[in-house]
Image: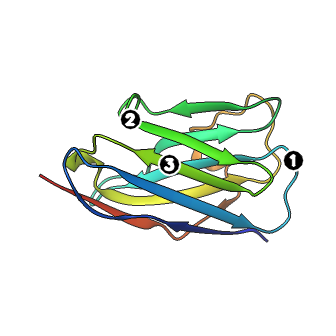
């Protein structure tokens, strides 16, 4: 069993920044992937960003956050960070961290069904 804990959410004005953190505990392979998803009120969960350390390090972003958000992490520490800059009111959502314990090289980081474990989420609110 793997547990994920997110932190770093909060209230920020439009144009501001926040940095989310996610720490995973439990046994995984060395080929893990971690992702960030979000769910806004009244909307379905959507992919935000992902990072994989399977077959080399790579990242992936949703078009809506490219150029504004940056994902990073530490494979050994099973930690992921999401630096969010130039925040917009439409970024308001609960942000969830997820992990793939045994990630295949080339997996689709945006597919929520591929993730094995999820955190409880952290609220991000961007005021206009």
Q: Report whether residue 111 is seen.
A: no
Cα–Cα span, label 1 and label 2: 28 Å
What residue does disc 2 label? 65
What residue does disc 1 label? 30
User: What percent of the width, then of the height, locates residue 71?
Assistant: 54, 41
Whether residue 54 sits left or right of residue 124 in the image: it is: right
Of the two numbered discs 3 and 1 on the same chain, state the one appearing first in sequence. Answer: 1
| Element class at badge 1 | loop
Pick the residue in front: 31 or 76: 76
| Element class at badge 2 | loop
Pick the residue in front: 117 or 55: 55
| Element class at badge 3 | strand
Pick the residue in front: 109 or 125: 125
User: What percent of the width, then of the height, locates residue 9?
Assistant: 39, 64
> What is the crowding at mark 3: few (fewer than 14 residues within 10 Å), some, or many (at least 20)?
many
Vertical order, 63 against 17 (above or below): above
Whether residue 66 sits left or right of residue 12 in the image: it is: right
Task: State yes or no: discs 3 and 1 in contact (Cβ < 8 Å).
Answer: no
What residue does disc 3 label? 82
User: What percent of the width, then of the height, locates residue 46?
Assistant: 43, 46
Q: Residue at x 77, y 47 (%)?
A: 32
Which image quadrant for residue 33? top right
Q: Residue at x 33, y 49 (%)?
A: 17
Whether residue 56 sits left or right of residue 42 in the image: it is: right
Q: Residue at x 44, y 64 (%)?
A: 8
Q: Residue at x 81, y 53 (%)?
A: 76
């Amino acid at each position: 069993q793997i547990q994920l804990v997110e932190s770093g959410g909060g209230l920020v004005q439009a144009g501001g920044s926040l940095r989310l953190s996610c720490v995973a505990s439990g046994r995984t392979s060395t080929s893990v992937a971690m992702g960030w998803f979000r769910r806004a009120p009244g909307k379905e969960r959507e992919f935000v960003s992902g990072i994989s350390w399977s077959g080399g390090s790579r990242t992936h972003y949703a078009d809506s956050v490219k150029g504004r958000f940056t994902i990073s992490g530490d494979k050994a520490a099973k930690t992921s960070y999401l630096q969010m800059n130039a925040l917009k009111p439409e970024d308001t959502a609960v942000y969830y961290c997820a992990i793939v314990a045994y990630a295949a090289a080339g997996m689709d980081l945006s597919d929520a069904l591929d993730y094995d474990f999820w955190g409880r989420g952290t609220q991000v609110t961007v005021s206009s």
